[in-house]
Amino acid sequence: SGFGLLSIILSYLVGSIPFGLLLSRKSGIDIRSQGSGNIGATNVTRLLGKKLGALTLLCDAGKGFLPIACLSLCTREPLVLGLAGAATVLGHMFPVYLGFHGGKGVATALGLFLFLDPCAVALALLVFLIALWRTNYVSVASLAASASLPLWIWILRGSSWHIPLALVVMALIWSRHRGNIERLRQGTEKPWKKV
Ligand code: G3P
């Protein structure tokens, strides 16, 4: 339907807003050319500190949360909601405003599923913290948490369409971490806290 298509496009456009880049602009450095080169909260923290990093996390999660929350007030159609949810994450990863060169989607997916399955997200967050604590790599924590999410949704009996959505989002997040995985293999990935 026209309504469905419009909501998917709007979700994509909201997801496309590169908050990390916008928030770091004042600092005068282009986060895309330093650290990991990513536009996400991890790289903003790495380059500009905890305050701006936390703000980036909040905004990127917020843009994952808002479109699906608004759309849920208008429709219960799983196909529309699922495609719009995926579109928000895809927007962050391939933003129209940045020539489709975007981020890795972890914070945006966090916001999206915080709305859909808050309990599953709490467990995935626990996986994230344990993985970060054990390995000292944010990328490993992101990979582990995103992989665990579909499982938590299944165990907690979330709406059946949330599981394929979580699987698609996980696959996207993993594919966006190819560079991180390669660096982890070679032992050149940057640790979270300097040791
Ligand atoms: O969410 C992104 C995180 O998993 C890795 O970020 O900057 O270390 O590539 P970064």
Image: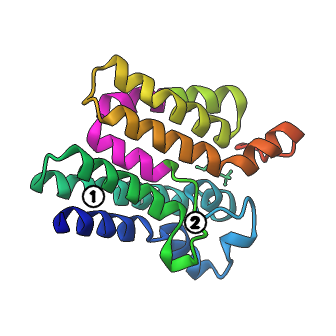
Q: Main secondary structure of the magenta part?
A: helix
Q: Is residue 100 visible?
A: yes
Left or right of residue 161: residue 171: right
* Sequence-first disc among 2 and 1: 1
Q: Say which residue label 2 marks.
A: 102
Residue 5, percent across and down? 26, 65
Q: Is residue 8 above or below residue 142?
A: below
Q: Identify the residue shown where x is 42% and y is 45%.
A: 110
Give the quadrant of the C terminus: top right
Q: Identify the residue shown where x is 82% and y is 45%.
A: 183
Quadrant for residue 151, please give it: top left
Q: Identify the residue shown where x is 33% and y is 53%.
A: 83
Q: Is the residue at mark 1 in contact range of ligand 1, meaning its CB lies under 8 Å from it?
A: no
Q: Which amino acid is tagged 2?
A: Gly
Q: Which amino acid is tagged 1?
A: Leu
Secondary structure at numbered mark 2: loop
* In the image, residue 172 lies in the stretch drawn in magenta: no
Frontmost of labels 2 and 1 is 2
Query: Residue 66 — which label?
Result: 1
Q: Is residue 191 above or below residue 102?
A: above
Left or right of residue 97: residue 154: left
Q: In this view, does 195 lie above or below 160?
A: below
- The outermost residue toward the left is 74
Q: Identify the residue shown where x is 37% and y is 32%.
A: 163
Residue 12, percent across and down? 38, 66
Secondary structure at numbered mark 1: helix
Q: Is the residue at mark 2 in contact range of ligand 1, meaning its CB lies under 8 Å from it?
A: no
Residue 127, percent across and down? 52, 26
Mark 2 crowd level (few <14, some 14–19, many ≥20, 10 Å Cα): many
The span shown in magenta is 107-126
Question: How does the figure colour the protein chain or chains?
Answer: rainbow
Mark 2 to mark 1 CA distance (whole Å): 19 Å
